[in-house]
């Protein structure tokens, strides 16, 4: 709070006239991120494309705010924008024929994938210096790949949406 006050040119204590505590401030930051999501409501079109659009829009918002990805992942959704995202995705999944429990599971997978993909994309880590890299030729080759994060994300969504489609097929369900 002191650092924020310093950045704003005010005393930290004066911030408490506007927010209750640090947690309230963090919730507000997450609310601002979700507010950037377009309101998709009951968009027309096939459910897989609606879900793909929602996931891609969520990813783009997270990429614009890399410093809050962990915060978004760790806080409950309570803002209008966040709840609209959830509602829109649940509508798409229910329109596909999933019950609310299956839709919830599928939505958790999609959101977790989007957050995890962005966290991986923006993350920076350096390899351990004391590793014997000769033991890991495939890792070395993999690390040298020129990966297109957009294509990688699209592939992941394809896999997830194929799994959701599989849930709709008659026979044993994957959901537990």
Image (spheres, rainbow, N blue to C red):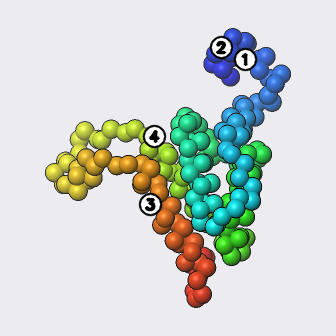
| Cβ atoms at labels 2 and 1 below 8 Å apart | yes
Residue at 57%, 72% in the rendered image: 164
Q: Give how far across and how far down residue 100 sits, in percent.
A: 73, 70
Mark 4 → mark 1, Cα distance in angstroms = 31 Å
Residue at 47%, 60% in the rendered image: 156
Please indicate, yes or no, whether residue 136 appears anywhere in the rendered image: no
Quarter occupied by the N terminus: top right
Left or right of 141: which side holds 152? right
Which element is circle 4 on?
helix
Name which quarter of the figure residue 16 lies in: top right
Q: How many numbered tags mark residues here?
A: 4
Mark in front: 3 vs 1: 3
Mark in front: 2 vs 4: 4
| The residue positioned farthest toward the left in the image shown | 134
Please indicate, yes or no, whether residue 79 appears anywhere in the rendered image: yes
Q: Give how far across and how far down residue 131 sits, in percent.
A: 23, 45
Q: Which residue is mark 4?
A: 122
Q: In the image, which disc is placed on residue 6?
A: 2
Q: Give how far across and how far down residue 61 sits, in percent.
A: 59, 42
Mark 3 → mark 1, Cα distance in angstroms = 46 Å
Which element is circle 3 on?
helix
Name which quarter of the figure residue 105 lies in: bottom right
| Cβ atoms at labels 2 and 3 below 8 Å apart | no
Quarter occupied by the C terminus: bottom right
Compare marks 2 and 1 and give the one earlier in the sequence: 2
Left or right of 18: which side holds 9? left
Q: Which residue is mark 3?
A: 155
User: Counting other residues with Cα less than 10 Å from the Cα at mark 1, is it few (<14), some (14-19), or many (20 or more)?
Assistant: some
Mark in front: 4 vs 1: 4
Compare marks 4 and 3 and give the one earlier in the sequence: 4
Q: Which residue is mark 1?
A: 12
**Which is nearer the eye, 151 or 8?**
151
């Amino acid at each position: 709070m002191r650092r924020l006050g310093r950045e704003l040119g005010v005393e930290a204590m004066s911030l408490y006239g506007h927010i209750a505590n640090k947690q309230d401030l963090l919730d507000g930051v997450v609310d601002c991120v979700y507010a950037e999501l377009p309101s998709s409501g009951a968009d027309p079109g096939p459910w897989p494309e609606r879900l793909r659009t929602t996931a891609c829009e969520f990813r783009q918002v997270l990429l614009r705010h890399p410093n809050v990805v962990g915060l978004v992942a760790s806080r409950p959704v309570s803002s209008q924008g966040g709840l609209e995202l959830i509602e829109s995705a649940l509508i798409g999944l229910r329109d596909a024929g999933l019950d609310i429990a299956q839709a919830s599971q599928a939505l958790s997978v999609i959101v977790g994938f989007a957050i995890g993909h962005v966290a991986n994309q923006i993350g920076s880590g350096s390899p351990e210096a004391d590793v014997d890299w000769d033991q890991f030729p495939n890792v070395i080759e993999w690390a040298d790949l020129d990966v297109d994060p957009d294509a990688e994300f699209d592939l992941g969504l394809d896999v997830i949406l194929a799994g959701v489609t599989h849930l709709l097929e008659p026979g044993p369900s994957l959901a537990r």
